[in-house]
Image (cartoon, rainbow, N blue to C red):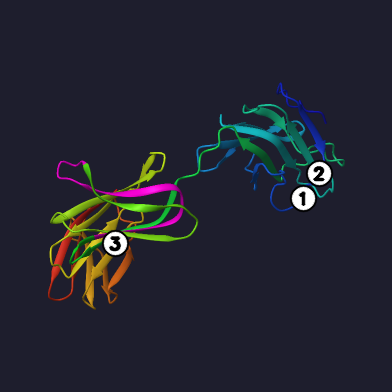
Amino acid sequence: CSSTEPTDPHAVVPTQEYFPGGLPQCGGVLSHRFDPIVAVGNSQSYDDGNGNTITLTMYSSACGTVFSWEASSNVEVHTIKSKGGGGHVINTNVYDYTGLHVHSDNNLHSPVNPVNNLYLGVSHVDVCYSLINPQPALPIKISDFSLDSEKDGVAIRWTTASESNNDYFTIERMMPERSFEAIGTVSGAGNSSVLRNYDFIDHDPFPGINYYRLKQTDFDGGSTYTDVKMIEYRSGQSFGISYDRHSNEMTLHSTAENITLAVVNLSGSIVESVEITDVDKSIQLPDLPTGLYIATISDGRNRESFKFCRY
């Protein structure tokens, strides 16, 4: 069988070779394996997490399954290896690209089956590629960021898993006019590849709801921000509640040994009720519908409530 070969203007040389198992063999450049392959008429995409994508689309031809690929503008494809589905030792077509190639290409396929002269089908596809403008490494990686209501104020704590060129952190609190204001700084570690713990006490939080975020500043002046965290603070309270909308977790802080948490919606229905014996406990809430909720914590003598929004 003879199908139209790829007509891309760059050099494309299909060959046959043994396709090893395991991870793609790409000789030091980036790689991705599409496995399993989607059905004919469908597409599948790979995203490296930074918006760089490679997409395969499967088609049917008179000779069997063929496919096209397309890469985003920051991706340069070097080699595509298409393994056939037959039980043959030599069952891979290798398409080598030379020069800058980021556009689509058509009619790639596996080798021809010597039994019926049709393509062997596509078992899986390896793509070897590089990035034209690689994304710089993030200056820090924060593995934990939490707030605790204490007798001296609000404790802001965070942990970094790694740091690169990190000069210092700025702790910012939202003011009544809804702008953020710096309330303190903590020196960074510069460069680090181990876990490092940091903390800062806000000795003068607002009564009620407080919002905080961290600003990280490099030695060269560049900066990044964390997500905003919320906590309710009451002066002299024996316990408190904080809520993380991203993880949908509620953290309870108490000096009492036995406390109860109840979460109700605006209709008054209880959506979560937990008896807690730990001084500090994180509760994974159920997948709540979007809306406003009231969380109440009680130790039998004292009772505190605060509202939070799920969206």
Element carrying mark 1: loop
Give the mark nearer the N terminus: 2 vs 3. 2
Residue at the disc numbered 1: 20
Mark 1, residues whose alpha carbon is within 10 Å: few (<14), some, or many (≥20)? few
In the rendered image, the vertical position of residue 103 relative to residue 259, given as above or below: above
- The location of residue 291, given as percent across then percent down, is 24, 50
Give the CA distance from mark 2 to mark 3. 54 Å
The residue closer to the viewer here, 213 or 113, is 213
State how many labels appear. 3
Q: Position of residue 36 (x, y in %)?
A: 64, 48
- Tag 2 secondary structure: loop
- Location of residue 57 in the rendering, given as x and y in whole percent from the top left corner: 62, 35
Kindly indicate whether the residue at mark 3 contacts the one at mark 2 (C-beta within 8 angstroms): no
Q: Amino acid at mark 2?
A: Asn
Residue 232 lies in magenta, yes or no?
Answer: no
Q: Looking at numbered disc 1 in the image, what kind of residue is underneath it?
A: Pro
Image position of 55 with respect to 253: above or below: above
Q: Nearer the viewer, mark 2 or mark 3?
A: 3
The image position of residue 62, as x and y in percent, is 75, 30
Q: Which residue is mark 3?
A: 250
Mark 2 or 1, closer to the camera:
1
Q: Which residues are magenta?
A: 155-179
Which residue type does callout 3 highlight? Met
| Secondary structure, magenta segment, majority class | strand
Q: Residue at x 69, y 26 (%)?
A: 99
From this viewpoint, is residue 59 visible? no
Res 90 visible: yes
Residue holding disc 2:
91
